[in-house]
Amino acid sequence: MDLTYDADSERFRGELRDFILRHRDLAPKSQGVMGGRATREMLDWQKLLLERGYAARSIPRKYGGHGATPNLIEAIILGEEFARSGVSSGVSGPGVDMLVPTLLEHGSEEQKLRFVGPTLRGELSWCQGYSEPGSGSDLASLQTSGTSDGSDLIVNGQKVWTSSAHLADMMFALVRTEANTKRHVGISYVLIPMDSAGVEVHPLRTMTGASEFNQVYLSDVRVPQTNIVGQRGEGWQIAHTTLKHERQVAGNPTELEATLRSLITLMENETRNGVRAIDQSALRERLLDLQARVLSLKCHAMRLLTCDLRGESPGVAGLVVKLQACELMHQMAALALDAMGDLGILYHGSKYERAEGTWQSEYMTWIGFIIAGGTAQIQKNIIAERGLRLPREPRPEAGG
């Protein structure tokens, strides 16, 4: 991996820094609900980023991107500079980060032209319909079904832990369309409008006090079969493409670095008995360990990006990101709470709270992400069995 910053790279960095400096007042102060509807402020900011090529840089223009040639160094510089400045890098969420790359790889031309551009611009928001009440980590056992009725698919079933379904315009969902097949066969990848008749969304309140997750009931929902991505009944591999990008999102170095910078700032300002948190040896050692791990994951992300640009499979390297990144984000939030001392237990509403209770919310949110998308225990099994080719974990005997 050649990470030399040549003159063109430094020129690009300078242009980007100048752009951020001159336009940072236009950037939204918060990303808002991930996967939810973008604010007017975010839509305007995303439009500006797309025009300048600082978002969707290498996605073809005909699909709504900037159309630049994929460039590893430029991708790294974009992440570094947005993280350094603390300025929003644009619209994010399951649509932009997971569905768009899946459609670019597997979607029909009509699907790409119809969905990619509005998603990149933040005009179309998405949620992910994978997990079901009895099919979480064992996703292949899903029961949501789809049967043909002329040119439509009639979908019935239930999805759960569906992030931002109460705000989304569309859902990309896994639906079993072929009966009497093996578990991993007969599943289709379907794009479902959330305003369709028969779609019911019921929010689930979490320990953060918010309702980011939902149960979604699908009762005789009619979906055009043109909304099936790839071939009918062959959605399992397409689903894995989405999961690959979901793991990469969890290990996004821009978010990791931005969180680390916020943590350092907090520790430089919080004091106990007149001593800054960052000057207390036990807390400082934890910070240094986390800083090293953030740098390690950043380098790892470069490795994965290199594989992606070359069209190569990263192998076991791609399997460790989600596990490591989620635990790292949770541990950074835990250190922030400890650095605040007694104030770390405060939440919304107290005059002594820090950062509007963001660290407390992050601490609880990342516990959820350690479970979401396959628990840490499942992730370790996948790494061991698929990545390292170790023997499969023994299955309990039926009735045992």
Image (cartoon, rainbow, N blue to C red):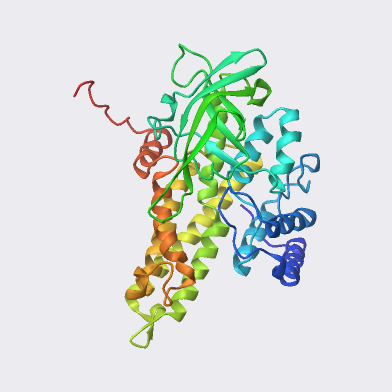
Q: Which residue lies at the image location 40% right of the left edge and 60% below the top edge?
A: 363
Q: Is residue 253 left or right of residue 226?
A: left
Q: Quadrant of residue 330?
A: bottom left
Whether 176 is drawn above or below 40: the answer is: above
Q: Give how far across and how far down residue 264 sits, in percent.
A: 47, 73
- Any part of residue 286 in sight: no
Percent x, y of residue 69? 76, 47
Q: Position of residue 290 (x, y in %)?
A: 42, 64
Q: Residue furthest bottom?
A: 274
Q: Is residue 319 above or below residue 85?
A: above
The mark tally for this picture is 0
Nearer to the camera, 171 or 393: 171
Residue 151 in percent (x, y) is at 67, 16
Indicate whether 220 appears above or below 252: above
Viewer-proximal residue, 306 or 354?
354
| Camera sees residue 50 | yes
- On-image quarter of the C terminus: top left
Based on the displayed image, in which of its 4 quarters is residue 283 positioned?
Answer: bottom left
User: Image point 35% across, 79% down: which residue?
Assistant: 280
Tell me if 338 is positioned left or right of 40 in this view.
left
Q: Residue at x 70, y 57 (%)?
A: 40
Residue 105 as seen in the image, left or right of residue 273? right
